[in-house]
Image (cartoon, helix red, strand yellow):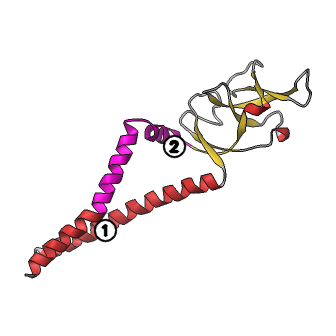
Amino acid sequence: MSNKKPLIVLSKIMNVVGTVAVAIVLLIAIGLIGLRVADLKMFTVISGSMAPTYEVGDMIFVKDTDYLTLKEGDVITFMADETTVATQRIIEVVPDEKNPEVIRFMTQGDVNKSKEGIYIHYKNVIGQPVFKIPFLGYAADLVKNPPGKYYVIAFGVVLLIYCLLPESLFKEKEEKAEE
């Protein structure tokens, strides 16, 4: 009888911990689905050029924007080249000399005090950041690449075992104790 009581307490503790872990995973999944439904793209800030607005390690959430509504002072996220995404402030909107319907945006980071920006073609604009979560970018980058990806997979396997295995073990022990 005294052997059964600690097992029941341990079983209840494991159920609570397992339930909380599953709830956290579900909330994260629902949040990520919500971001996709809201058509937000996520990017990690990897340079300090926009500090203090966006710090290194921040996760920014970017919404598609009509380029015609963009104006001087707006912050945009854009393709700087084929592989680089950047976020900077528009310091000037410049129509193309040959075709005024083509717009370019001169941008620069907030840290840069000189007026030497870069020109971005309107087709390279991804959108505008709508909010950020500080430091989440570090976690996202860790999960995207090995070994972080392997840690997440291992955590999922351990969580699954943690949720399923103890119940079957406790049932076996309870059945033996009843005999």
Q: Residue at x 43, y 63 (%)?
A: 23
Toward the left, the furthest residue is 179
Residue that mark 1 sits on: 15
Disc sitting over residue 120 in the figure: none
In the picture shown, does residue 69 fall above or below 97?
A: below
The answer to whether residue 10 is visible is: no
Mark found first going from the N terminus, 2 or 1: 1
Q: Which residues are magenta?
A: 134-163
Magenta stretch, main secondary structure class: helix
Q: Looking at the picture, how far across and down is residue 178, in whole percent?
A: 10, 81
Residue that mark 2 sits on: 136
Local crowd at mark 1 within 10 Å, few (<14), some, or many (≥20)?
A: some
Q: Amino acid at mark 1?
A: Asn
- Secondary structure under tag 2 reads helix
| Position of residue 138 in the picture relative to residue 82 (left or right) | left
- Secondary structure under tag 1 reads helix
Local crowd at mark 2 within 10 Å, few (<14), some, or many (≥20)?
A: some
> Is 98 covered by the magenta stretch?
no
Q: Looking at the picture, how far across and down is residue 10, in whole percent?
A: 22, 68
Q: Residue at x 90, y 31 (%)?
A: 101
In terms of image quadrants, where is residue 95?
Answer: top right
Q: Looking at the picture, how far across and down is residue 136, in whole percent?
A: 51, 43
